[in-house]
């Protein structure tokens, strides 16, 4: 019964790992848009992730029914992507004109790396637990996956605060935003990995006696003086 539960949890973890990798390596966490004042003009929308910013020049021929922003981002246009210089000196990407934006992105990317490290350690422990007599590895595996989920949700919150700060700042042109599918993948990874980690911790707990007599009968006899 325990082995079946571990296998089911392992399948859920695989989905969580896939969601995590999709979120970390893609750049559709948030889509930013400037205000569009008139039609038949070109505007520049942007989408970004932990590592890269992509700006897209879109020619607007009809009004956006949901507002006055540039887009949607799926419209055809000239696309230009550049990687953030997180850990090296140099000019920041144009969208990060606010000085604190670089610190936000560095923090989110660093915590995401920690999340990947915890996820890798958890996977190694879980694979080792399938060996005979290695059930003790389930507990550290559960802890590592729970930590991985915690790290990725912290990274999500940092990115959310970063986007909010850019929208609220008078130094940027962005007035509208929405979170895209990479953001959803990160939230899904948090849910799946955290729940799977907790499940492994519960599964790894020792057998609970069905009644108090089992504990009394299994107890070692006390020595007689």
Image (cartoon, rainbow, N blue to C red):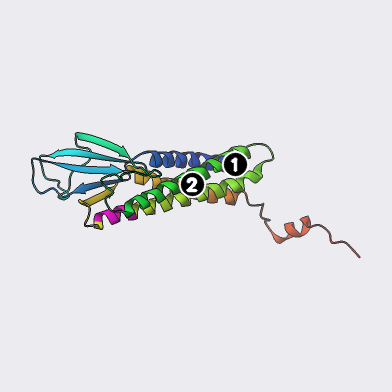
Judge whether 208 appears above or below 193 on screen. below
What residue sits 36% from the left and 39% below the top? 26
Q: Is residue 70 magenta?
A: no
| Quarter of the image that includes the C terminus | bottom right
The answer to whether any part of residue 4 appears in the image is no
State the residue lying farthest toward the bottom.
225
State the residue lying farthest toward the front.
89
Give the camera-side residue of 206 and 189.
Answer: 189
In the image, taking residue 86 as reference, residue 10 lies left or right, namely right
Magenta range is 161-167
- Residue at label 1? 125
Count the marks: how many? 2
Q: Position of residue 90 (x, y in %)?
A: 34, 43
Give the camera-side residue of 46 and 85.
Answer: 85
Q: Dot 1, how many residues are within 10 Å of its Cα: few (below 14), some (14-19), or many (20+)?
A: many
Numbered tag placed on residue 114 in the rendering = 2
Q: Position of residue 73 (x, y in %)?
A: 22, 40
State the residue lying farthest toward the right.
225
Q: Give the alpha-carbon distance from disc 2 to disc 1, as whole Å.
A: 17 Å
In the image, taking residue 66 as reference, residue 93 lies left or right, namely right
Q: Main secondary structure of the magenta part?
A: helix
| Quarter of the image that includes the N terminus | top right
Q: Hey, which quadrant is residue 85 in on the image?
A: top left
Mark 1: which secondary structure?
Answer: helix
Numbered tag placed on residue 89 in the rendering = none
Q: Dot 2, how many residues are within 10 Å of its Cα: few (below 14), some (14-19), or many (20+)?
A: some
Query: Marks 2 and 1: which is nearer the front?
Result: 2
Q: Position of residue 122 (x, y in %)?
A: 55, 43
Mark 2: which secondary structure?
Answer: helix
The answer to whether any part of residue 70 appears in the image is yes
In the image, taking residue 135 as reference, residue 70 lies left or right, namely left
């Amino acid at each position: 019964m325990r082995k079946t539960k571990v296998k089911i949890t392992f399948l859920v973890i695989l989905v969580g790992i896939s969601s995590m990798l999709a979120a970390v390596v893609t750049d559709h966490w948030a889509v930013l848009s400037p205000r569009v004042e008139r039609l038949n003009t070109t505007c520049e929308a942007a989408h970004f992730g932990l590592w890269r910013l992509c700006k897209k020049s879109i020619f607007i021929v009809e009004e956006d029914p949901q507002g006055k922003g540039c887009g949607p981002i799926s419209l055809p246009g000239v696309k230009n992507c550049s990687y953030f210089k997180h850990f090296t000196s140099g000019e920041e990407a144009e969208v990060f004109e606010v000085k604190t934006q670089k610190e936000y992105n560095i923090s989110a990317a660093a915590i995401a790396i920690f999340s990947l490290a915890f996820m890798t350690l958890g996977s190694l422990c879980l694979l080792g637990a399938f060996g005979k007599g290695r059930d003790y590895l389930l507990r550290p595996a559960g802890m590592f996956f729970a930590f991985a989920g915690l790290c990725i949700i912290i990274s999500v919150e940092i990115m959310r605060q970063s986007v909010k700060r850019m929208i609220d700042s008078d130094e940027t042109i962005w007035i509208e935003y929405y979170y895209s599918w990479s953001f959803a993948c990160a939230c899904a990874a948090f849910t799946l990995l955290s729940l799977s980690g907790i499940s492994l911790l519960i599964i790894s707990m020792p057998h609970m006696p069905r009644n108090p007599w089992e504990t009394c009968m299994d107890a070692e006899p006390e020595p007689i003086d």
